[in-house]
Image (cartoon, grey):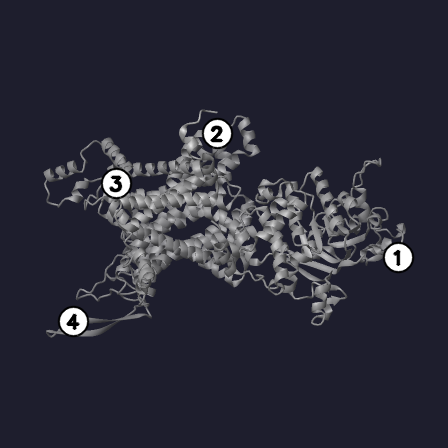
Amino acid sequence: MATKTATSDVIPWDKIDMLLRHRTGRVLLAAITALLVYVVLSGTGIGPEETSTRIILSMVVGCLLWAHLVYGAWLVKRELQGLFVIWGVVTVVFFLRFLTPGDPTIALTPPDASTDVREQLARRLGLDEPLYVQYADYIWNLVTLDMGRSLRTQVPVMDLILIRLPATIELAVAATLVAMVIAIPLGVISARRRHKPADYSATLFSLVGISTPNFWLGIMLILYVAVTVDFLPTGGRSIGFAAAWGGLLMEGDFDGISRWFAQLILPAITLGTFFTALLTRLTRSGMLEEIGKAYFKACQAKGLPETIILYKHVLRNTLIPIITVLGLQLGTLIGGAVITEFVFAWPGLGRFLINSIHSRDWMVIQGIIIIIGIGFVVINIAVDAAYAYLDPRVELR
Amino acid sequence: MISARLRRSLKREFRQSRMAQVGALILVVIFITTAFAPFFAPHDPTEQRIGTGTTEDMSYLPPPVFSTTENVTVFEDGERVTREVTTQGNWSFVLGTDRHGRDILSRILYGGRVSLSVGLVGAALAALIGVPWGLAAGFAGGRVDDTLMRWADVMLAFPSLVLAIALVGIFRGTPFHTRAIGDPFVWAANSDFVPNILIPRAGHVAEMPESMTFPVTVTIVVALVNTVWFARVARGEAISVREEDYIKAARSMGTGKLTILRKHVLPNSMTPIIVLATIQVAAIILLESALSYLGFSGISLSWGQDIQRGQSDLRRGWWMATMPGLAIVAAVVAVNLVGDWLRDALDPSIEGEGGV
Amino acid sequence: MTEILRVEGLTTRFFTDEGQINAVEDVDFRIHEGEIFGIVGESGSGKSVTALSLVDIVEKPGQIVSGRIWLRNPHLADSIRSDNPDAVDGEMVDLRSINPRLRRALRGSAFSMIFQDPMSSFNPSITVGEQIAEAVEVQRRAKANPRSTASRTQGFGLGQFAMATVLPSKRFVTPAGRDRAIELLELVGIPDPAQRAEEYPHQFSGGMLQRAMIAQALASEPDILLADEPTTALDVTIQAQVLELLEEIRDRTNMTILLITHNLGVIARTCDRVGVMYAGEMVERGTLTDIFRDSVHPYTQGLIGSIPQLDQVKGRLQPIPGNVPSLRAAELGDRCYFADRCPKAMKRCLEKPPMFDVDGSEKHRAKCYLAEQPYDEGDALPEDYFDG
């Protein structure tokens, strides 16, 4: 009804709209954008210098675009909520720090430093400003993606975190995979062979699994497994994911990948056990509930193969409530990762957090908490999207 | 609050479930032995027995039946001599000793006092804060509900262990971080008011430590980070109860909101809250042991701390890290079993065995 | 008319913690090709368990204890005649005596089931079209590869399942199956079937979903359609449409239908022959007129007396006094189970009556001494006999 501008005549909006409505079209658009971002990044030399980081960055941009095309307003709303949560946490942590006793400069200076030196340091770090100024400064810096510098080493917090982030993600993903691969079939078998020995042992395993402190489990694995099996190291991370897989794919180097696998397996089991146990429990009770429903009988009457009934029909419906609980339990996974990293000297964010608390490096503590918070928000949004994907009755609004 | 029907259901479920019986048995044993630790502990858990020339070296004793062998280099007549030394377990120290020659069994009994009391006090505290919070939100509805629950979301949206570590790390240096609590049994055994005949093994008890250290901040923090679970459950219950006809009737008769909450909503919400509280005791025991293990709790006599020390002595013996961990697993398994029993008995809508 | 199903002495019991429950006790009936056979009875009389027993999906602790289920299947009869002569009688095959794997493979193709509540009988998270296509696919695969159908996974194990999640071409449901599902939806009168096939059960109305359920049952081209209370969960106007659809399908494809309902009105308007069930037993069976006009068993008479009829001005409805008995074996005893509610109970009824032919016709039979002798008031049980 309004007068058309020149651009709307040139750009075929209706065709673009059609493209965006189509599943493949959205993926295509996201992929093209990612490629463009990569080309621009490497052409102009802006941003990260390493090629792998550039690839990851452009892929992240592509995924984000795709997600916004698919989920639109809902995603924006959830992102705003997530920002609110993170802001809340940042604020709480920032002000809590001023409730703690002791002058932070004491920890940062030699014990015999004079008051003058300490005051100078405080001025340099901006600690002499009024609280609200410091707070506003900090928030403003955060908006510009600057988390400040470590009080101890003066290295930018962002860099310190980015180095350690891959190790933590690797561990968390490995543990989740371990949990899913073991727990879901175990839960299905347990439900299908109810009140049989297999069921009782699965139930016992899950009971002990959710009752075992994971730091102790890690120590026991070191004590009884790593010491006897030469192949497995007792801790540390000697090779990264990219180096190991890159070595395998580019040079056919099996040594790197086997070292990578060996160093990851015990931490992954340690972190994954609680989740395996929890997931087994949930899968079992969920399956039992679904098997009692009328559609299960209908599937049997149709003559469907058992595989299809159990894994396509029943398991899918079982996953819907499981996903909600897992979303709520993600905090446990992240908390567990902190401890597991500490036990296995895994150079990730969790161990860094504990070390920073011991050394009272506030900027680092805040930075890590923000990053963990962002990760948590992202995963929670993903969980909600998965929920809506699995249950057609749920609409994302 | 617990009706006759519920009591019957509890009994029936208890009779039928072997798991519930095992859990209750373990829990009772742990409760009695830790609460009356001065009577049951064979030794003073803090007494060190390092060889000083006049006393025998009792450090790194393995549990009886087991023995360790190691090469020790000593100077003898001005020469280095390497000798193979075998250490045999001693029946006086059933679970062995640690690097200072302290009895591990006694340490486990005393450490259990800390874990169980933090678990119980923490869960109770979390319920005391969380339940009114959730009930208020659910029963008031509207904007009050939104505001209160938005905070719950913020708290829920954050890994509780990370939050606990950060909080405990912050308050570590404060004077109220830990509190010493006198041991009434030891006090009684030492005092002249109570005739010693009334106390079994009075002489033994009198030599036990006079007080235990209670981690105040840790308890408050674990309670705070778990409050939100109670708030969620209480809110859900309040909302469902609010819609019941008898509540509507009570409101229409002009009964005050507080009265309705106290007389109708709270009793009806008790069942899931009791079940949740039980499960939370287990969760809090685990959380406390993790914080102790990381060295944030400020007490030296706890299961988590002993495991940490055992880890640094892993090369000298397996029992130091293994034994306290087994104690944690036993306690948490027992609490979880009792929680399952309560849930199956109190909430017939959930089909038993598993589920969170 | 050729006989297509013959059930002999079917007995299904549930062995629960509280004791043995005789849900279906010694039930006999025959169904001919192209007819609609109705089973009527109060809730808890064992109608549904009879249907589940036919398809062999009685869940534990239930178990089919004895009985033979003869189904006409000339092809199968020829192929197993030499190996298992006991299981074959002419063109009929006894489903109880063949290999359980073979029986499982026959599930969709011998019997298809329509359930009472369409909303809960469809999986809520899978599209209706896909679920119908699955039923099509089971039969297509069974025809293409008869041997693999006998296995528990029917040649579609976890490996194939995992592969199918990655490769769309390996999926269980093929595009051909989907197209057939759309045809079937059109067949049962669902407008815009291609669009509706992509929708989920919660987007359908109850009546539409029941039509889709019928389409799903037709997908496997069954010998017999088992309709278990197909109209109970629906509005009255929709009920009539669904019944019309069933009749239409019968008329068009000569499908055999076993209709289970508690509603005598439904029976009266659709069925050719009827069986009346009470306390797990089939107490009387015959043609529609046999049952509605010449019924012998006092229970059948009571059932008919308790339906309101507009054209007859009766004083009031005649309810049957008392309740359906508990089916616990311990409480049933060895008598006519209806005797305690029967207005014409005789001393003889304390002994279990056998199945009698009524008026010498093998087609109308009743489990009641009244089929053999008229009511003898002198022999009547005292009214308070069961009160003590």
Using the rendered image of the protein, determine whether residue A382 is visible from the camera's viewpoint: no
**Relative to B195, A78 lies left or right:** right
* Residue type (three-letter) at the residue carrying disc 3: Met
Q: Residue A351, relative to residue B72: is it above or below? A: above
**In this image, C354 relative to A170: left or right?**
right
Q: Quadrant of residue C81?
A: bottom right
Outermost residue on the top side: it is: A2
- Residue type at mark 2: give it: Lys
Q: Are marks 2 and 3 on the same chain?
A: no
Res A147 label: 3
Q: Residues within 10 Å of mark 4 (few under 14, many from 20)?
A: few
Residue visible at 25% across and 50% down in the picture: A355
Residue type at mark 4 is Val
Question: Disc 2 to disc 3, how far (Cα)?
Answer: 48 Å
Residue B352 appears at what percent x and percent y?
52, 52
Q: Viewed as shown, does residue C158 lie left or right of C98?
A: left
Q: Chain of mark 1?
A: C
Mark 4 sits on what residue?
A: B74
Q: Tell if the residue under mark 3 belongs to the same chain as the one under mark 1.
A: no
Q: Which residue is mark 2?
A: B257
